Amino acid sequence: MTHADVDTDTFPTGERGATRSFADAWAAVSETLVRGLAHALSNRIATIGTIAELLRVDGDDPVAMSEMLGVETRRLEDLLEQMRALSAQQSGRQEAMRLTDAVAGAMALHSYHPERRSIAITVEPGDESRPVLGDAIRLQRELILLLDAATNAALAHASRALRVRFGLHGTVGVVRLLVGDAAPTGALPQCASGAIALGVEESVAGVAYLLVIPALGPGA
């Protein structure tokens, strides 16, 4: 298996050997996610309008429709929160966070990518006895860009499968996105102290994308 380090201002596209800058990658991916979120918002608004009209004309079960209205309103609020997260400004501050929260937040936003539904994703959390350290918004965006690259790679792979593994590895937190039958070597990309690093491992079986994040606590 070959291993190639990529600095965290350059991200893979999902095509073998192809990369683009963080700014270009985020502009492209965020535009796609905004369209996906806008479509979901339109669906929720249309559904709420239909329920409101049925209530206005005394539908068969106003209690059930009122409950449905509450459910749809909460879904709409969730979508608006996702829009806020997508447009949030990077703080530049380092803060402690759980890998579970970082990964879940990135996956929730990337779920609005239209290609995501055509691949099978499994999530495999590991040791999270200590938090990781970073700019929460920047980390979420880096994870979204890796999810986008992994999605593109999975679409080109026969299995159309993606495994998301994350947890502590010594003094760092590691997120691995494994496409196809990729089996990571265990080697981690080199990074400066306290910095986030990105690596790519390619083989005939698949590709593995790795994000390495500083961790807090004993030994960190």
Image: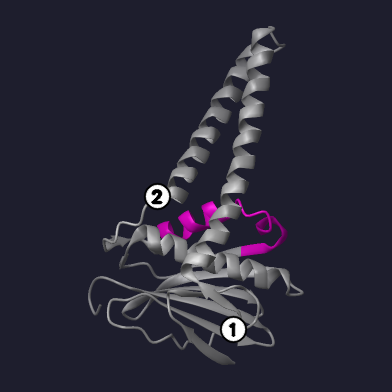
Residue, disc 2: 88
Name above or below for residue 213 compared with residue 201: above
Magenta-tinted stretch: 100-121
Magenta-colored stretch includes residue 201: no
The image quadrant where one finds the N terminus is bottom right
**Residues under numbered marks 1 and 2 in contact, where contact means CB atoms less than 8 Å apart:** no
Of residues 35 and 117, the one nearer the viewer is: 35
The x and y percentages for residue 215 are 30, 72
Q: Does the magenta stretch include residue 115?
A: yes
The quarter of the rendered structure image containing the C terminus is: bottom left
Please, what secondary structure does the residue beneath circle 1 have?
loop
Tag in front: 1 or 2: 2
Whether 201 is drawn above or below 48: the answer is below
Where disc 2 sits, the SS reads loop
* Label 1 sits on residue: 183
Identify the image quadrant of residue 167: bottom left
Give the residue type at disc 1.
Ala
